[in-house]
Amino acid sequence: MQQKIVILDFGSQTTQLIGRRIRELDTFCEILPYDKFPADDASVIGVILSGSPYSVHDSARFKVDLKPFIGRIPVLGICYGAQYMADIFGGQVDQANTREYGRANLEHIDAADPLFKGIEKNSQVWMSHGDTITVLPADYHAIASTADVKYAAYAGSKLPVWAVQFHPEVFHTTQGAQLLKNFVVDICGSRQEWSAASFVETTVAELRRQLGNDRVILGLSGGVDSSVCATLLHKAIGQNLTCIFVDHGMLRKDEFHQVMDAYSDLGLNVIGVDASEKFFSDLKGITDPEQKRKLIGRDFVEIFNAQAKHITDAKWLAQGTIYPDRIESLNITGKTIKSHHNVGGLPKDMKLRLCEPLKWLFKDEVRRVGRELGMPERLIGRHPFPGPGLGVRILGEITPEKVAILQEADDIFIEGLHRWIDEDGSPLYDKVWQAGVVLLSTVRSVGVMGDERTYEHPVALRAVTSTDAMTADWARLPYEFLAKVSNEIINKVKGVNRVCYDISSKPPSTIEWE
Ligand code: XMP
């Protein structure tokens, strides 16, 4: 049976990060809402209680019944999780005199405790809490402290319970990965069997069992998730998979053909549909970003459905939905921050069942699975690209002429990122989460080229670093690289006479301009 760590989510922003760290330990984990512990699931080998935006004193705090697992399975409480258990078990949690936020050092460590195996005295940890534990419950003892936090970590004297008031999952806790390894591997006994190879093997077997001889349709976007999903399904059911790739005319330069070729090399059965004329004709005169987006979405579904209807015996619709798309974490007001992606717009009479084989994977794991399946690096390492394509990167009305200008500028920037090798030997492209060019077609500025005065459009280069696109920072690209790209765009792309670099982070800006 596949072992599993359950992370009960009390709404902390770093809950997903705990999940990622555990997967890095080749251990399967599932993030569940704080009150959804699967009591009858024998595969759970450990439980982690996450942090929370709440204080244990808030009347609206999240309460959970610990009985189904305390004493039975090892438990690790993190931040709120640590304070919640201290409070419930009869200890005391008070508001800290000063909010304990930022770096601290573990001055005292109980080196005999298995949670701290290999962790050095004075190791740096990251604190982020307004409350602090002032009295430990009976039968619990301190196992680490900092200058300001007496009970930085504690453990059960009789029960398999551990708790830390700092965040081992974040980068600033320098030995956090070791601590989590101590918990997951040594304390919970993970066999560390979760790997891309094991995922492919079990998922292919599972898909064959689930789908039998049924026909499956999948919408390809050229992106990593849908491509890996298709390749995995192809391995499982071969030609019973039919993929549909719609060209809405707003893909990047030569992208449609390049991606079709890559899919054909992978042996996929793909129907490529050039629908650009319909999109451009429907987009005529539309300038409002939301209206443009909705129209592109509507046309896309219409064209996809028209194609899908020809595959009359299809029983399943496969989607490349991945784990971060589905995790529902709760914010302070209890509202869902991110909700499940679903198949909006599909006609009811299609009666297709949904197949989402990547739904447990994080983005980096999807890439590892792609490599395991032998997919080309150029396809796997691709930056995310929005469904409406260059349509969300052209201000004002979208026309084929503007798309052509943007495709040229975008190609220079993206190819430049591929070709520029950084000091550590890897291409600049791999250092950024996502990059693209925005055509500021509602703006004109004066320039001079040779003896001629020009009055043309600026473009903005956008490149960001991120782990999940929820937050992002502008990438610190080398000046020499930006200078080269700027020169090349202005010299080669007719209609552009100025290049800007977007230095806004998200929030408050977004990655895309529209
Ligand atoms: P924002 O602009 O919201 O983008 O910071 C976050 C991530 O989502 C992508 N994005 C989209 N993807 N359809 C998509 O499939 C869309 O309408 C869309 N809008 C933004 C964006 O490229 C980034 O990766």
Image (spheres, grey):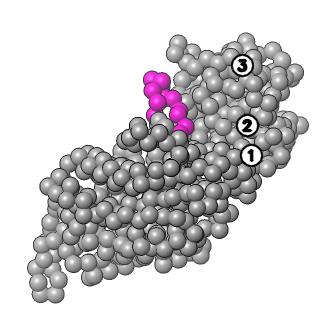
Identify the secondary structure beneath mark 2: strand
The reply to whether callout 2 and callout 1 are in contact (CB within 8 Å) is yes
Label 1 Cα neighbours within 10 Å, binned few <14 / some 14-19 / many ≥20: many
Residue 485 at x, y percent in the picture: 36, 76
Amino acid marked by disc 3: Leu
Q: Residue at x 60, y 37 (%)?
A: 15
Residue 349 at x, y percent in the picture: 41, 39
Task: Give the mark, 2 or 1, whose residue is nearer the N terminus.
Answer: 2
Q: Nearer the viewer, residue 184 or 30?
A: 30
Label 3 Cα neighbours within 10 Å, binned few <14 / some 14-19 / many ≥20: few
Q: Nearer the viewer, residue 328 or 150?
A: 328
Disc assigned to residue 66: 3
Task: Give the mark, 2 or 3, whose residue is nearer the N terminus.
Answer: 2
Identify the secondary structure beneath mark 3: loop
Identify the secondary structure beneath mark 1: loop
Q: Residue at x 53, y 45 (%)?
A: 315
Q: Which residue is mark 2?
A: 5
Q: Which residues are magenta?
A: 324-337
Count up the numbered dots: 3
Amino acid marked by disc 2: Ile
Task: Give the mark, 1 or 3, whose residue is nearer the N terminus.
Answer: 1
Q: Residue at x 10, y 79 (%)?
A: 453
Amino acid marked by disc 1: Thr
What's the CA distance linking mark 2 and mark 1? Answer: 8 Å
What's the CA distance linking mark 1 and mark 3? Answer: 23 Å
Q: Which residue is mark 1?
A: 27
- Is label 1 or label 3 in front? 1
